[in-house]
Every structure is written in C-alpha cells, then in structure tokens.
Amino acid sequence: MKRTLDFAWPILGILAVLFSGWLLYSELKTISAADIIASLAAIPLSRWCLAILSTFVAYAALAWYDRIALLHLQKPLGWGFISLVSFTTYALSHNIGASVLSGAAVRYRAYSTKGLVSAEIAVLVALCSFTFLLGTLMLGGIVLIGEPNLFVRLFDLPLWTARIVGVLFLLFVFLYVLGSILQFKPISIGSFQVFYPRPEIVMRQLFAAPIELLGAAGIIYFALPPSEQTSFFAVVGLFLGSFSAALLSNAPGGLGVLEYLFLKAAPELNAADVIAALLVFRLLYLLIPLIFACVVVLIFERKQFLTAVRKRLS
C-alpha cells in the first residue's frame, strides 16, 4: 500500500498540473505577458507593504496551529522553535504538494528531537489539518450564505443550494464546539479513537484558523487594484474555494488550479490583474518562504549530522 502511494501521489500531482495547465491556457490565450507586467508595475508600494504584512499574519497564525496542537497534547514548547518548525513545514508542503504527508515528515523530524513520539506527532498533524478545515468551513459557510454567486459560477447550481451548503458548514462547526463543551463520546475509527479537544483548545482553533485564511487572502486582495468588484469579502470567498481545490489537487503549489478557478469564478475581473495578483501571492506566500525553509532545513540537518558524528566518536 505504501509503495502504491509513493507512486500515486507524484503521478496525481503531475496529472493535476497538466490538466489545470491546459484549462488555464484556454483562459489566458488572449492575455499578453506585457499586460501582466503592466498590472504588476501598477501595484503601489503601499499595497505591496500591506500584502507583505498579510503574509506575516498568515504564517504567524500557522505557527499558532502548532502551538494549539501542542497545548492539546500538554507538550508546551517555546514559540521560537514552534514558529521555525511551522514555517518550514508549511513552506515546504504548500510547494511540494501532498501537504499532509510532506508536513508530517518535517514535523516528525523536528518534534522528535524534543521528545515527542510518533503517536503524538500524528495527533499534532491531524489537529493542525483539522484547524485549517475548521477555518475553511467557518469562513466558507459565511461566504456561501453572504455571496452565493461565487459558488453558482463554479458549479452552475441555484443560489439556495449554496446557502444550504453554507448552513451545513456552520452547523458542522457548531456541533464540533458543542461536542467539546459537552464532552461527547470520542469518535471511533476502527481501533482508533478521536477525542474532542478541551473547550479552551477549540476556542483557540476558532480564532487561529480564520486569521490564517484572512491573511493569505489579504495578499491577493492588496495585490488587486481597488474596485467595487474586489471587495475583501469576495476575495476571501474566491481564495477559499480555489486554494482548497489547489491543495486537494496535489499539484505542487496548486500550480494552474488556483489561477484557473480564480478566473472562472470572477470573470468580471481583469484577467491580467488577477494573474498579477496571484503571482504576488505565489512570490510572498510560496516561493520566498520556500527559499528560507530550504536554508532552515540545511542548517538543521547539518547540526543533527555533526551531533551524530560527535556521539559516534565519543
């Protein structure tokens, strides 16, 4: 099974990139590179600064994901170490694809040096993933109720369908909170039992998850030219749908998927402006963090290697 997955994930990612690339080409064939460059040049310095600030907000919230999971495990660690591990984890997993698997590998390597065992790290990874899901459902539910047209454009369904889905999303969040407060029985998955976190943990999740998503969406919002069609609420909705699909596609960095869905759901926006804004997002949220993460991994592994050599020689 493991060998099959080792082959399946890369193949799935390549197919997702090729298919989404073909779809994206059909959307972009009328746009010139000069149009995109002009859109990039038109972004004022003040909005670049706000986009950079949004990036810091998003990655700070992602570090909070790990902090919350460690508090759930009653394994508190220093904010500095957590921030470094979280930053490296997400910078690599967002770019590589198969985010749960790649994120788990990085976290295992780092947190095992602090005494966490495999089972604890597995719970940490699961809780971080669920925190992201919680934020997506919470904000997604609000957007689907308030801006159902975004859903309708993508799936060609009536408005009431979008609103019902939004209500179901928020109902799921409510039941999760209720289960924590009333301490419902753990959910059994085979021989594995999932316990509801303590209420104070859930409250932290409800704050951290939306902050990360709003920060990431803010990068795109500030890179787009201000207009009535690009309200922050609408951009958040577009980002939630396209970024979630990009992660599920397993395409490295959601390449092609993010751009295609954004253009598909917002045909009223200037396509060159959208592509320019998404290039800014990729630069600030994906590429620059990836470079720093690779440096962090090299320094960490060098330190671990030298420690192992010294132990061997002593």
Image (cartoon, rainbow, N blue to C red):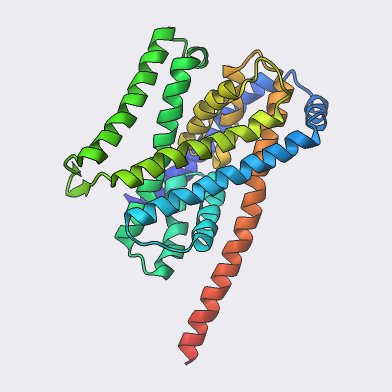
In screen coordinates, is 131 left or right of 276?
left
**In the image, what residue occupies the spot 81% across and 30% down?**
37
**In the image, what residue occupies the spot 56% across and 43% down?**
58
In-front residue for pair 171/309: 171
Farthest bottom residue in view: 314
From this viewpoint, is residue 310 visible? yes
In screen coordinates, is 17 left or right of 181?
right
In-front residue for pair 181/69: 181
- Residue 288 at x, y = what percent? 67, 49
In-front residue for pair 148/24: 148
Q: Is the residue 180 above or below the residue 21 in the image?
A: below
Q: Is the residue 152 above or below the residue 205 in the image?
A: above
Total labels drawn: 0
- Residue 195 at x, y = what percent? 23, 46
Q: Is the residue 204 above or below the residue 74 in the image?
A: above
- Residue 281 at x, y = what percent? 65, 37
Q: Quadrant of residue 217?
A: top right
